[in-house]
Every structure is written in C-alpha cells, then in structure tokens.
Image (cartoon, rainbow, N blue to C red):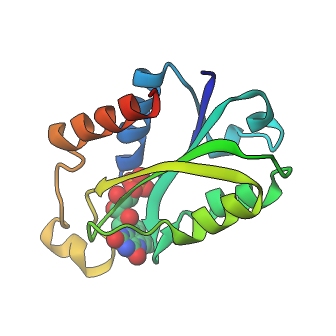
Amino acid sequence: MKTLIIFTSVHHQNTEKVAKVIAEELNADLVPIMEAQPGLPASYDLVGFGSGIYFGKHHKTLLRFVETLQPVTQKRAFIFSTCGDGKIHHAALKDKLVTKGFSVVDEFFCRGWDTVGPLKLFGGINKGRPDGNDLAAARAFAQGLKK
Ligand SMILES: Cc1cc2nc3c(=O)[nH]c(=O)nc-3n(C[C@H](O)[C@H](O)[C@H](O)COP(=O)(O)O)c2cc1C
C-alpha cells in the first residue's frame, strides 16, 4: 500500500510529531505542504492530510491545497489533526476531500500545546502534548489503516 502524507505544522510542530509516527508505521512518504504538488496523490493508494486546527478548521494552506487537486475516483484518504480544545474539527477538510472524490476511511486527532493569544501568558494549555500516549494512539490508528 503506497502511502503519502501531506501535512503542515506551524504553531509548535505538534502535528509534525503525529505525522512522523503515522508515516513511520505506514512506511509513508511524508511531504510538507510547501513541497506538495497537486499531481502528487495520483501515484499513491492512500493519502493522509493533517495540520493543527486554526479557527475551527485545518490550516488554510492545507485547505487551499486540496482545492487545487485533480478530482480522483474513490481514492482512500485519512485525516488527522492536533488542537487546543480536544474536539474534532475535520468537517471543512473532509467536505473538500469528498468533493474531490476521496473516500475518507478514518480520522485521528489529539490535543496539542496551544499558546494562542492570552494563553501564552500562562505557558499555554496542553503543554507537552502530543505526549507518549497520544503518539501511541497515533501509531495504533496507523496500524488500523493497514487492515
Ligand atoms: C491562531 C491560532 C488559532 C487556533 N485556533 C484553534 C481552534 O479554533 N480550536 C482549537 O482547538 N485549537 C486552536 N488552536 C490551537 C492549535 O490547533 C494547536 O496548538 C495545534 O496543536 C497546533 O498544531 P501545530 O503545532 O502542528 O501547528 C489555534 C492556534 C493558533 C496559533
């Protein structure tokens, strides 16, 4: 199963930690969004998309990238994220992927260190996250994608 992971991780490299664990488990090619070309997913069986959550959505560079992709036919995809509030915020990215013809087979999220706005005065929330437990959960998620 040839797997590609496209990600961006701009706040504290939180999502990059998750992306690396999933990529390692799946032996996937890990490509930062700034290096991703719209034609890239075509040669893969499974494509992962992930970033931190910004104002309730994945990072705008990832959302915009998905808009540039050529339509596909039921290509398997998965979504992942890290966020401050520990809730799932995948609807915007999922909608765009489904519109392009991807089949979103699974999703993963966990908390990430967040120092946005006034939070930074107190050292932020979720310091140290993703932690070992989060990364173990990410690995288990990736193992599930192999079935
Ligand atoms: C400008 C900004 C906006 C954010 N908006 C949200 C949000 O709407 N919901 C949330 O749960 N976390 C929010 N966060 C927290 C990030 O999603 C969290 O820190 C994430 O782990 C960052 O991932 P990264 O380090 O991979 O970029 C925001 C952070 C920043 C800097």
Image x and y of residue 68, in percent: 82, 56
Is 20 above or below relative to 100?
above
Q: Residue 32 vs residue 44: left or right?
A: left
Where residue 47 sits in the image (x, y, percent)? 62, 38
From the viewer's perspective, is 116 left or right of 27? Answer: left
| One can see residue 31 in this view | yes
Residue 96 percent location from the top left of the image:
68, 65
Vertical order, 132 against 120 (above or below) = above
Give above or below for 37 relative to 2.
below
Q: Quadrant of residue 83?
A: bottom left
- Residue at position x 16%, y 56% in the image: 127
- Horizontal placement of 43 versus 119: left or right? right
At 80% from the left edge and 46% from the top edge, which residue is drawn? Answer: 73
Q: Nearer the viewer, residue 72 or 62?
A: 72
Tally of numbered discs = 0
Residue placed furthest toward the front: 147
Q: Is residue 11 visible?
A: no
**39 and 144: which one is in front?**
144
Q: Position of residue 45 (x, y in %)?
A: 67, 30
> Which image quadrant shows ligand 1?
bottom left
Judging depth in this view, the residue of 141 and 128 nearest the camera is: 141
Q: Residue at x 37, y 28 (%)?
A: 143
Quarter of the picture holding the N terminus: top right
Quadrant into which the C terminus falls: top left
73 vs 31, left or right, is right
